[in-house]
Amino acid sequence: MPLEDCRTIELPKIQSSKGNLTFIEQNRHIPFEIKRIYYLYDIPGGEVRGSHAHKSLQQFFIAASGSFDLILDDGYNKQRYHLNRSYYGIYLPSMIWRVLDNFSSGSVCIVLASDYYDEYDYIRDYDEFLARVIYRDNV
């Protein structure tokens, strides 16, 4: 999938003097059914997360608190996103290499996933990822 298929999605934000509320509805705000939610937190300074791609899984990343960077790579181009607002997220289709870094102190990254955990869906070797991209694009 090309990087153009990745996109920032603004989520609803209901403001009140009592605080703000944001919600996410599957197949409405994000283009898939949510089957798994996980979150990253207490990331030590300078640590990097991710460094993999998925064969079929789609995901949606949100900085629920603090900030972090999401570096996306489709095998041809790379793009860095800085996430720091809880009412914006980044949609990733399958076959996008992702690296998360530059976590601020106290940051929380929430990830919505289109399927249950499946180790077989992971591509953890960058050279294998590139080979799959090139093969896909030449078939």
Image: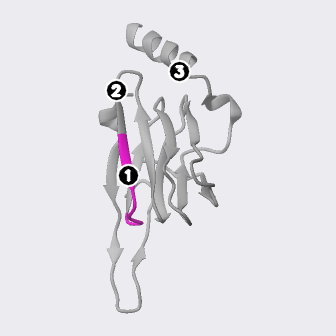
Q: Image quarter for residue 11?
A: bottom left
Check disc 2 and give the amino acid type: Asn
Measured from the top left, where is residue 52 in percent x and y? Answer: 57, 32
Identified at 63% across, 55% down, the residue is 44
Check disc 3 and give the amino acid type: Phe
Image depth: mark 2 or mark 3 in front = 2
Image depth: mark 1 or mark 3 in front = 1
Residue 69 lies within the magenta run: no
Nearest the camera: 86 or 22?
86
Identified at 46% across, 60% down, the residue is 63
Identified at 59% across, 51% down, the residue is 35
Residue bearing the label numbered 3: 129
Q: Mark 2 falls on what kind of element?
A: loop
Judge the density around disc 3: few (<14), some (14-19), many (≥20) Cα neighbours within 10 Å: many
* Image position of 87 with respect to 93: above or below: below
Look at the image and tell me in which quarter the N terminus lies.
top left
Identified at 34% across, 26% down, the residue is 77
Q: Earlier in the sequence, mark 2 or mark 1?
A: 2
Q: Earlier in the sequence, mark 2 or mark 3?
A: 2
Residue bearing the label numbered 1: 82
Instruction: Give the label on residue 77, or none.
Output: 2
Measured from the top left, where is residue 16 in percent x and y? Answer: 34, 88
Q: Which residues are magenta?
A: 80-87
Measured from the top left, where is residue 113 in percent x and y? Answer: 55, 48
